[in-house]
Amino acid sequence: MSNMMRDSQIMAQIKDENLGYMSDMALELAQMADDSGLTTLAYLFRMAALEASTANSVLEPDDLPHQMTSH
């Protein structure tokens, strides 16, 4: 395997780990906000956790199927 391929795999793994950490941290902060009665802040942290957990599953425009249309 070339160094470039290995490096890109390592970077992708680090990105996945960082996103997982951010999601977990945001959920912990949401719980702390809930415990303190800060419902709106808890909601925002939950949205941040959701965003972090789905960041890798977002499709790029090139990944979308192209529809055939007849005119």
Image (spheres, rainbow, N blue to C red):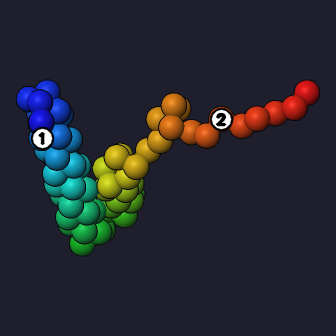
Q: Which residue is mark 2?
A: 66
Q: Give the left or right position of residue 27, taking residue 18 as reference.
A: right
Q: Which residue lies at the image location 16% right of the left edge and 46% below the top edge? A: 13
Q: Which residue is mark 1?
A: 10
Please state, as top left, top right, bottom left or bottom right, where the C terminus lies in the image: top right
Q: Which residue lies at the image location 40% right of the left edge and 49% below the top edge? A: 57
Closer-to-camera residue (42/51): 51
Query: In this view, which residue lies farthest toward the left?
Result: 3
User: Residue 20 appears at what percent x and percent y?
Assistant: 21, 55
User: Looking at the image, is 44 positioned above or below residue 6?
Assistant: below
Amino acid of disc 1: Ile
Q: Which residue lies at the image location 82% right of the left edge and 33% below the top edge? A: 69
In the structure shown, which secondary structural element does the residue marked by tag 2 occupy?
A: loop
Q: Give the left or right position of residue 54, taking residue 1 as reference.
A: right
User: Residue 64 appears at what percent x and percent y?
Assistant: 57, 39
Q: Earlier in the sequence, mark 1 or mark 2?
A: 1
Whether residue 29 appears in this view of the structure is no
Amino acid of disc 2: His
Do residues under tags 1 and 2 come within 8 Å of each other at their CB atoms?
no
Dot 2, how many residues are within 10 Å of its Cα: few (below 14), some (14-19), or many (20+)? few
In the structure shown, which secondary structural element does the residue marked by tag 1 occupy?
A: helix
User: Residue 55 appears at what percent x and percent y?
Assistant: 35, 46
Closer-to-camera residue (45/9): 9
User: Residue 11 appears at what percent x and percent y?
Assistant: 15, 37
